[in-house]
Image (cartoon, grey):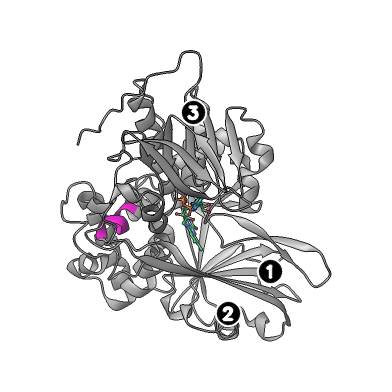
Amino acid sequence: MTEPVPDLASPAGRPRHVAIIGGGLAGLAAAAALGSSGFQVTVLEARPFLGGRATSYPLSQADGQTLTIDNCQHILLRCCGNLLDFYRRLGVEGQIEFHKEFFWIEPGGRMSVMKRGLLPAPLHFTESFAGLHFLSGKDKLSIGRALLAVKSEFKNRRDLDRISMLTWLREKKQGPAAINRFWRQVLVSAINEELDQMAALHGLQVCWLGFLARSDSYQMGIPNVPLAELYSDDVWSRWPTVSIRSRASADSVQTDASFIRTVTASGQAIEADAFISAVPFERVANLFPDLRLDLSAFHHSPITGIHLWFDRPITELPHATLLDRTIQWMYNKRDGRHLQLVVSASRSLVDMQRGEVIDLAIRELAEFFPEVRNAQLERAHVVKEVRATFSAVPGLEEKRPLPSTAIPNLFLAGDWTRSGWPATMEGAVRSGYLAAEAITRAFGEPRRFLLPDIA
Ligand SMILES: Cc1cc2nc3c(=O)[nH]c(=O)nc-3n(C[C@H](O)[C@H](O)[C@H](O)COP(=O)(O)OP(=O)(O)OC[C@H]3O[C@@H](n4cnc5c(N)ncnc54)[C@H](O)[C@@H]3O)c2cc1C
């Protein structure tokens, strides 16, 4: 598809100005790319802090102190090349700690460890996979066969966006234990959707890039600072070309001869040569009524995070995935006493009262970590993100819009646009880089920012 090229003459001597609406990862990635390529950039962010859905905020404590917590644990895999590139541009890549072991725990506490062995990719998990306690030999063989099919089908099969992951797994004759204890456990957290609602394309992409293509691509990156510190004012103060305006909620744009000329944010009009919308899909129609995008196929999928503080250490593990229960992941935030639990595609929790969610979390946690039964819960905090991500249903991929729009100087970014990835931090950064590339093309100075996938 060819993109319309706006006739945007360069005002002599003045760097071109791009206004970016939305200071989540998509908007910030576009700002970093353009800000290092001769553009002057203004980021308008409605909230007082940056990072959008991947952020942290202060929580006041009983002793009057404040504690900064992430809205929800965010992890990345080493195959997230563009996200890592974005962190490098900001100079914060050293704040990501990579973990090389995955811990799987069954109710009752039996643990299995998955890690790289001696064989080269894609066979690097063979030894540890053979030793997993929670799968039968028959299930391991059938999962192994399906993983080999991922390798051959991911780039060659054309219908993967039209069928669900569950359909694909049934086609590959995966039994209930393989589906529930392996595929579901890995993919529901990665894509934030149930297997019967998730396009097989995304499931195969995660398996290929994250677990098969390279022997280190599965390593799990966890920021060792609160998320908002990765994109703090201090970080951006080193970018004279990027001006960040927080508490600046864009509420309208002013158009002239089919170009957008200004955006009004919190009562102030900001002029720019080009604009990037980096807001979630549900905000686009209000802000840009003239765009007339058909977003009727987009729906949300929720994620629930549960922070628990105990009076004693519950575990020494840094993290673990918990089998056969509602809670899917445990992250050890501090000393085994502050744990964060995560439930993806958490529709069953959305209508529950806060107290019910906490009771369920503690009940389930005690099945994996018996020390919970002896411990006192000092504090709990539940974050239900009902609009966590878009639901990556079959058929949606072709409906995700490209960065260029019918308005020649308006470009779209956001994890929901056609980034080539599902709704993740990597997807958001990719979309920001793609929008920035589209702007440089529109100004006749094409630049590449997007790094290719690792395989
Ligand atoms: C609970 C939870 C857990 C997650 N876990 C992971 C994970 O482990 N790994 C992973 O890779 N991804 C994870 N994700 C997904 C990831 O957070 C998102 O895909 C990504 O952050 C989206 O970035 P974005 O820039 O596209 O959108 P957003 O982060 O939503 O950014 C949009 C920004 O636009 C601002 N905005 C909206 N309207 C306006 C306006 N009118 N004017 C100005 N500003 C406006 C918003 O305040 C926001 O800051 C998780 C998401 C959630 C919610």
Q: Is mark 3 within 8 Å of ligand 1?
A: no
Q: Nearer the viewer, residue 354 or 265?
A: 265
What amino acid is found at the position of numbered circle 3 in the picture? His
Residue type at mark 2: give it.
Leu
* Alpha carbon separation for disc pair 3 and 1: 44 Å
- The total number of labels drawn is 3
Mark 1 is on which residue type?
A: His
Q: Which residue is mark 1?
A: 338
Picture coordinates of residue 248, whole percent (x, y): 58, 47
Query: Which residue is at the front of the view, 252 or 296?
Result: 252
Q: Residues within 10 Å of mark 3 (few under 14, many from 20)?
A: many
The segment highlighted magenta reads: 200-205
The residue depicted at 55 percent of the width and 35 percent of the height is 88
Q: Are marks 3 and 1 in contact (CB under 8 Å)?
A: no
* The residue positioned farthest toward the top in the image shown: 12
Label located before the other in sequence (3 or 2): 3
Splitting the image into 4 quarters, where does residue 2 fall? top left
Q: Nearer the viewer, residue 209 or 260?
A: 260
